Image (spheres, helix red, strand yellow):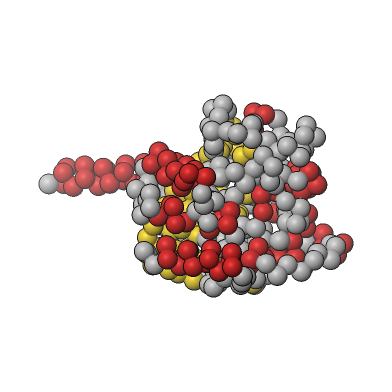
């Protein structure tokens, strides 16, 4: 009996060890200048951040469903809608027709009005009625097993707390006030052991500063998904250089995002090792694009290749370009 119990206990310990060794997976899906980022935990729970564009013969919903299937995901546990703009929420209706979504997470009602915003929000509400809708505020968490997903911004508010002083704030320019949905984006800090990644949706610069000025309440991160597709209304130097990411991933399109001035701010961030891009930026030309090895899609008319990331609890992670299968491993700090 003791031998059997010992074998059972040994088996449990081995299983637990193998389970603990499984990585967190993140898929930066090409939706042509929108956002669709799929996060898959070691226990196969899933969180999709935004659902890309509507139309285009179901292009974005099909790309998301294809990546989800390859990751072993049969349903989306949490769909986080960062804000109500077409390139982020427009694809939700087509998505739910292809893959079940259990929980819809957002910042509350749409703050924009008019014919198009009203219809966009109505379509989202109809889709969200198929699952459970959750409204979050800054400081809330999304309950994924083994993962800490903290809401750091929502509906124009940022998390509060203490942090080290940010010397860049004293010389920060006066960024313009943004009254659009961009400034109300749900921003997430994702932590898996020592690994940290941040995604702020389309948060614009004035609201970005709320997180790091006068004190940096986020700290350093390993991976920064460039805000607002790499546009210069976002990606404030005061934010990025305070976060000091080791790797940045730009979810731009061929003709959207990847603004040269924003690209340079990201590229010059202290400690940045690499900048990966979902698309080659036509506006960036040779001066403001990463080497082709780090770009998932080189042509404007493309197959929609993605960038994939797997992270370990010790803080090490690996990034793969699915176009050319090039990969790079970043050791734990």
Query: Position of 153 compared to 68: left or right?
Result: right
Residue 280: which quarter of the image? Answer: top right
In this rendering, the answer to whether 113 lies above or below 52 is below
Identity of the residue drawn at 71% across and 38% down = 281
Quadrant including the C terminus: top right
Residue 320: which quarter of the image? Answer: top right
Identity of the residue drawn at 76% across and 53% down = 232
Identity of the residue drawn at 37% across and 64% down = 131
Query: Position of 79 compared to 131: left or right?
Result: right
* Image x and y of residue 234, in percent: 73, 56
* Image x and y of residue 297, in percent: 61, 33
Along the viewing direction, whichever of 4 and 151 lies nearer the viewer: 151
* Image x and y of residue 4, in percent: 16, 44
Quick check: can you spot residue 17? no
In this rendering, the answer to whether 299 lies above or below 9 is above
Quick check: can you spot residue 130? yes
Identity of the residue drawn at 40% across and 55% down = 96
As drawn, which residue projects farthest toward the front?
115
């Amino acid at each position: 009996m003791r031998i059997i119990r010992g074998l059972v206990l040994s088996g449990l310990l081995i299983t637990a060890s193998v389970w603990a060794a499984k990585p967190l997976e993140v898929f930066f899906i090409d939706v042509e200048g929108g956002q669709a980022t799929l996060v898959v935990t070691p226990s196969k729970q899933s969180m999709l951040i935004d659902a890309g564009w509507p139309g285009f013969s179901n292009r974005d919903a099909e790309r998301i469903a294809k990546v989800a299937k390859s990751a072993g995901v049969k349903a989306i546990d949490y769909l986080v809608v960062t804000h109500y703009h077409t390139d982020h929420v427009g694809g939700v209706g087509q998505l739910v027709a292809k893959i079940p979504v259990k929980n819809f997470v957002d910042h509350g009602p749409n703050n924009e009005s008019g014919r198009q915003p009203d219809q966009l929000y109505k379509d989202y509400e109809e889709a969200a009625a198929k699952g459970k809708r959750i409204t979050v505020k800054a400081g809330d968490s999304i309950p994924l097993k083994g993962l800490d997903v903290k809401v750091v911004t929502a509906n124009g508010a940022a998390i509060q707390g203490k942090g080290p002083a940010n010397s860049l704030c004293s010389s920060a320019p006066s960024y313009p006030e943004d009254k659009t949905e961009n400034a109300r984006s749900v921003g997430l800090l994702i932590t898996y052991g020592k690994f940290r990644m941040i995604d702020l949706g389309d948060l614009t610069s004035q609201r970005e500063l709320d997180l790091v000025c006068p004190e940096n309440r986020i700290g350093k991160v390993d991976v920064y998904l460039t805000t607002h597709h790499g546009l210069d209304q976002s990606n404030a130097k005061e934010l990025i250089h305070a976060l000091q990411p080791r790797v940045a991933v730009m979810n731009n399109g061929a003709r959207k995002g990847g603004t040269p001035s924003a690209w340079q701010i990201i590229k010059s961030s202290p400690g940045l090792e690499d900048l990966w891009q979902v698309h080659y930026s036509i506006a960036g030309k040779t001066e403001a694009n990463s080497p082709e090895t780090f770009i998932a899609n080189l042509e404007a008319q493309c197959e929609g290749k993605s960038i994939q990331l797997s992270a370990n609890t010790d803080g090490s992670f690996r990034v793969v370009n699915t176009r050319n299968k090039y990969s790079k491993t970043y050791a734990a700090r």
